[in-house]
Image (spheres, rainbow, N blue to C red):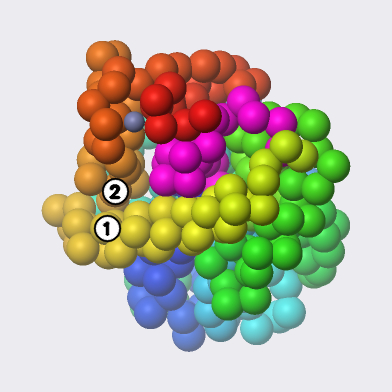
Amino acid sequence: MPELPEVETIRRDLEPRLAGRRIARVEIALDRVPVLEGIDEATFREGLVGARIEGLDRRGKFLIFELDTGARLIVHLRMTGKLLLDGAPLVGHLRATFTLDDGTTLRFTDMRKFGRLWLVDSLTPLFDKIGPEPLTEGFALEHLAAALLNRKAPVKSVILDQRRIAGIGNIYADEALHRAGIHPSRPADRISDDELAALHRAIRATLTHALQYIVRHPDAHGRPFIVDAYDDRMRLPRKKNAKCPDCGTLLATQKFGGRTSYFCPQCQK
Ligand SMILES: [Zn+2]
């Protein structure tokens, strides 16, 4: 599932190929599960055809296409959504196709169909509840402290909450907690100042490491590769009988909100 590093590398990959192009055609695949959120197909198409893509932005796990009309096309890939350019082999169900003025096609495909598209005039209703961006210069220790303050919930659940911090999903939450040596079920308000500082460093190190890994290891088409299984962007092998890379202890698992957490019972107290 794409989290901040994956979505950010997709943004960096697509922007130079799409910026400056006009959208010539929009096709939405017929499906029982709608891909458009809060807008009907005719209004969506009308708002996009003829618009020029000025640039691509990102907020949390959302990709934002800035248009010269002032509107924004927003994409959330959720579990299995993909944005495929031109001849890239089709993966999953075709959900929408955007044809640009130079003939480039951008297809939105999705195996599980949780991904969604929006066309909005204002970012406010969608983004005003999203927490700070953990990789920006401005993400200081006190922002993490504020996110955890007075939260009795497990620290894992708090850092997964997009309203507290943007862009962290199940995998990188586990990675960051392992780096920081913090057990995922520890109540957020019981994290010490030293642990908080370690977690702040760990979140940034985890996301930065993943970003650099993805850039260095593109797929066969030179595009960002979305992780489906364990690779070296992660420290914790997410499989049965996997061992802690630091101490060799068997990793333990625990469910939080239906998602499996991996952690080291020895290193994460
Ligand atoms: Zn360990």
Q: Is residue 184 above or below residue 120?
A: above
Q: Nearer the viewer, residue 187 or 229?
A: 187
Left or right? Give the position of 194 relative to 180.
right
The percent position of residue 75, horizontal first and vertical second, equals 58, 54
Q: Is residue 185 above or below residue 3?
A: above
Left or right? Give the position of 239 relative to 175.
left
Q: Which mark is residue 159?
A: none
Check if mark 1's residue and mark 2's residue have beta carbons within 8 Å: yes
Query: Ligand 1: which quarter?
Result: top left
Local packing at callout 2 (Cα closer than 10 Å; few below 14, some 14-19, many 20+) is some
Q: Nearer the viewer, residue 209 or 82?
A: 209
The percent position of residue 205, horizontal first and vertical second, equals 42, 59
Q: Nearer the viewer, residue 194 or 185?
A: 194
Q: Which residue is located at x 36 percent, y 75 percent?
A: 17
Camera sees residue 73: no
The percent position of residue 55, horizontal first and vertical second, equals 53, 79
The percent position of residue 130, horizontal first and vertical second, equals 74, 55
Q: Quadrant of the N terminus?
A: top left
Q: Secondary structure at mark 2?
A: loop
Q: Which residue is located at x 78 percent, y 56 percent?
A: 146
Q: Which residue is mark 1?
A: 213
- Is 253 inside the magenta-drawn segment? no
Camera sees residue 226: yes
Give the residue type at disc 1.
Tyr
What is the count of numbered marks? 2
Q: Which residue is mark 2?
A: 233
Q: Which residue is located at x 46 percent, y 80 percent?
A: 19
Q: Which residues are magenta?
A: 168-188
Q: Which numbered disc flags the more N-terminal residue, 1 or 2?
A: 1
Left or right? Give the position of 264 relative to 163.
left
